[in-house]
Amino acid sequence: MSEHDSLSHARDIAPLILLIDDVPDDLRWLTALLRPDYRMAFAHNGHAGLHKAQALRPDLILLDVRLPDMDGFSVCRLLKADPLTQAAPVLFLSACSQPQERVDGLAVGAVDFISKPFYPEEARARVRVHLELAAQRAASEATTVAARAEGAERHPDRLLVQEATRYIRAHLAELPPVPELARRLGLHEKRLLALFRDHLGQTVSGFISEERLGHGARLLSETTMSVQDIAQTVGFTNPGNFATAFRHRHGQSPLAYRTAAREQLPPCTA
């Protein structure tokens, strides 16, 4: 595979959809419908959905209006209030056809509704349209930022590094060994190692470790996720390994780091 092909392959990472629903039949139906084209993540109640959204930063969220612990409108309101999750379009799943419910959903930040019972072509079309709109907004913002950066380096090697680091950040929980990672990016292992050494001054493994611990630190300070869930989200096989690596990097345990981070937050004002 050529380096041009490797860039195209990395850009083709399927969008991630977070499905927040506690109805087994809905989960099975939507998974069968969407998994061929998208990556899927799941949560069975509102609180778990908020944590998953913070950790995974999905491209789109499908949210049931009726959840066992809190209503979907409250979940949507919290998603839109959080800088970590506010950019993801939210589509409500609802068996109710009352106009007021749709108005309430749009008022808290949702972009659309998918009615139950589901119609396959309609559901796929709504998901596709809102992913495309979100991608267009993101591309427009990225173009604006790029236009402001004078003399930005566009060397092919740097583009390869950018795509490789983007892939790593998008797959922290499930990264393969470095030789397989290089193959997925369309590169030889030695080529990938040389790119990271020359452009980032790091080994690939060192970069992955820094990203995992950095993302773990952000989740500790910005969410209420458990240490075990954070460890799994950033790619550690067990929380003990995560705690050991975190202490070595930050000089304190994950729980101590979380406590210190919260003490430094500005007080809430009425």
Image (spheres, rainbow, N blue to C red):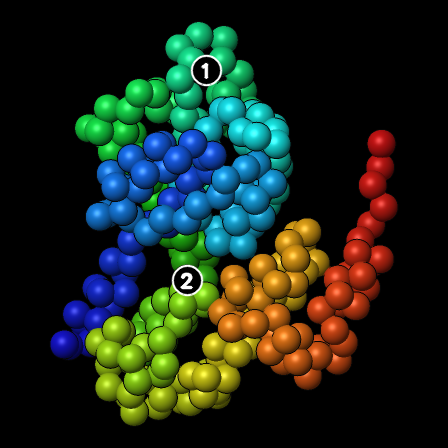
- Residue 169 visible in the snapshot: no
Q: Position of residue 34 (x, y in %)?
A: 27, 41
Residue at image coords 49%, 8%:
100
Residue at image point 58% right, 67% down: 231
Q: Which residue is mark 2?
A: 170
x and y percent of residue 27 in the render?
Answer: 37, 37
Q: Mark 1 highlights which residue? A: 102
Q: Is residue 116 visible?
A: yes
User: The residue under label 2 is which amino acid type?
Assistant: Ala
Q: Position of residue 260 (x, y in %)?
A: 81, 64
**Which of the pair 86/62 is nearer the observer?**
62
Disc 2 is placed on an element classified as helix
Q: How many marks?
A: 2
| Quadrant housing residue 164 | bottom left
Relative to 130, does residue 142 appear above or below in the rendering?
Answer: below
Residue 221 versus residue 88 in the image, above or below = below
Q: Quadrant of the N terminus?
A: bottom left
- Looking at the image, the residue that sits furthest to the left is 1
Q: Quadrant of residue 186?
A: bottom left
The quadrant in which residue 80 appears is: top right
Q: Judge whether 9 appears above or below 28 on screen.
A: below
| Coordinates of residue 42 in the picture (x, y in percent) | 44, 45
The disc label shown at residue 184, or none = none
- The single residue placed furthest to the front in the displayed view is 24
Is residue 262 or residue 30 the one in the foreground? 30
Disc 1 residue type (three-letter): Arg
Of labels 2 and 1, earlier in sequence is 1
Q: Disc 2 versus disc 1: distance between alpha carbons?
A: 33 Å
